Image (cartoon, rainbow, N blue to C red):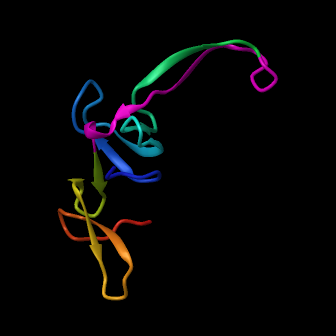
Amino acid sequence: MQVRKGDTVVVITGPHKGRRGKVLRCFPKTDRVLVEGVNMMKRHTKPTNRNQQGGIVEREAPIHASNVMAWCAAAGKASRIARKTLEDGTRVRLYKVNGETLND
């Protein structure tokens, strides 16, 4: 998977195309990611100790990882991600659009 939890991504295809958000969770086995504010669904919940009232709760549903792309704020556009090993042996992730490193 190219994106990780905490990365800012943009949806590149589907009904939510163009929306940006932060990755909340990654599901590597199913190749899906949970993006903040994207693919909202309504969930009918029963009253519990945590949610006393119950009712209809709106929350994010996973979206396929191939439908999102990392967002480079410096370049102002979406970019693929490259991996590079530095001289001291540490591995970093870079935006391919401008070569900047991602915050890990």
Q: State the residue at coordinates (29%, 52%).
A: 71
Residues shaded magenta: 48-68
What is the residue that sits farthest to the front in this orientation? Answer: 29
Above or below for 15 versus 76: above
Residue 9: image x %, image y %?
A: 34, 47
**The quadrant where residue 82 appears:** bottom left
Task: Give the percent coordinates (x, y) of residue 40.
Answer: 45, 24
> As drawn, which residue projects farthest toward the bottom?
88
- Quarter holding residue 62: top left
**Who's the residue at 44% across and 34% down the image?**
37
**How far across and down, in percent of the image, does residue 30 sit?**
39, 34
Residue placed most toward the observer, 74 or 32:
32
102 lies above or below 42: below
Q: Residue 73: which quarter of the image? A: bottom left
Q: Is 103 positioned to the left or the right of 16 in the image?
A: right
Q: Tell me, yes or no, whether the highlighted magenta stretch contains residue 45.
A: no
The number of callouts visible is 0
